[in-house]
Amino acid sequence: MVVPARRSFLVGPVNFHGPCAPGRITVQVRGKITAPPSTAVSTWSRVRNNYWLMFSRVDGLLDGNRPPQNITSPPKAIQTTKQDVRYYAHHSPNLCKPCVACTFKFLISASPYLKLTTPGIPLGGQTPCVQSAPTALKLVRCNNLEVSRISSKDSPQMHVAILQSSGITLRKLTITAPGSSPNTDSIHIEQSQNVRVADSRIGTGDDCMSVSSGSRFVAVDGIECGPGHGVSIGSLGKNGDTAAVEFVDVRNVRFTDSMNGARIKTLCLGGQGYAKSISFTNIEFDNVDHPVLIDQFYRDRSVQVGVAISNVTYSNLRGTSSRATTVAFDCSGGCTDIHVNSMVITGPGGRRTVARCRNAQVAISGQVYPEIPCRS
């Protein structure tokens, strides 16, 4: 599919729905794609899945602006930017996002800026808001897909969501949003397998990466994260669901001025299942609030059972924390088979730090600071 150069096309929220006959599909954007104006409220209100661009059931998709016959090394693909957005600091549990003058600008590849203005959508006569604001790019039920050299700035919701897909590679991404913008996860992976994210710079108002239930064999390598909420496994166990996450390898990541670093989070809301075979290797922290965190009481501390966490390894972690508690293993029914091998995390200027743990079985090897009080 080619968007011709020196041409302009008006495109609203769109789902490129496969399957397609060719074995490999190339999307080549050379011209201009313009989103509907703010007066087209009905255009956006009828989008049930809250997306702007979605590719579903498309295998072998390569986004770029090189000639279609050259599909071996895709160049810059899809860029999204948004300006002049003012979200309130709070948002309600239904993810309704109150806002004033919500103006989104989207940029695709080498084309000019694409402007989308959406007024607040009233809910039952309440304060106008954007409910479940649109994710910039959704990849659903896609296989053997590679996207590279994406620059995404200030998506109103998640920047990239990968759902029910397999064999996905994302590399050389630059994703940014204000540190105060809620729910602007950079890359969200859910019910997907064999996903690799590499060599990217991320700074958002939520998770730099989130790996959710149904995901396995996820590799993260060479990421810079900050600001943001770190690389998170979860949250898991929402609405009493049975979670399943395994074989996640996170390595060569640097966290700078982020709220969290290496985080696993589950909700004690009747959730079940497991998160296991997870590793964090060669991780650097620079002024991170919570560098190492397992939080099994995310949003609720009243229930004492939940998702089982096991076989988690931390190897060669170094850096500084902005707070005294740098390591927290806060487990409900018990975290088992936790390994910490070579970790030194101090406070600013080398100040002393502490570790906290509850219901965790931790094996220690190599130099480890601060001392972890729940050794197995």
Image (tube, rainbow, N blue to C red):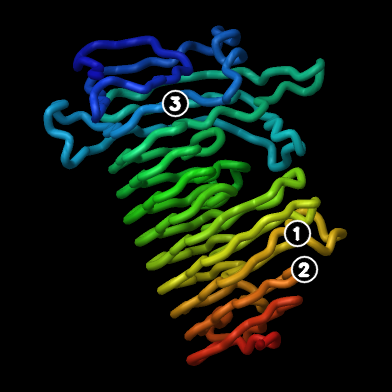
In the rendered image, which residue does mark 2 sit on? 333
Mark 3 to mark 1: distance in Å?
Answer: 33 Å
Among the 4 quarters of the image, the one containing residue 276 = bottom right
Q: Does residue 113 appear to the left or right of 276 in the view shown?
A: left
- Amino acid carrying label 1: it is Gly
Q: Are marks 1 and 2 in contact (CB under 8 Å)?
A: yes
Mark 3 to mark 2: distance in Å?
Answer: 39 Å
> How many residues crowd mark 2 within 10 Å: few (<14), some (14–19), many (20+)?
some
Q: Nearer the viewer, mark 3 or mark 2?
A: 2
Q: Which mark is residue 56?
A: none
Mark 2 lies on a secondary structure that is: strand
Q: Which residue corresponds to the image point at 13% horizontal and 33% vertical from the top-left?
A: 70
Instruction: Look at the picture and state if 159 lies above or below 312.
Output: above
In the rendered image, which residue does mark 1 sit on? 306
- Amino acid carrying label 3: it is Met
- Amino acid carrying label 2: it is Gly
Q: Are marks 3 and 2 in contact (CB under 8 Å)?
A: no
Q: Which mark is residue 54?
A: 3
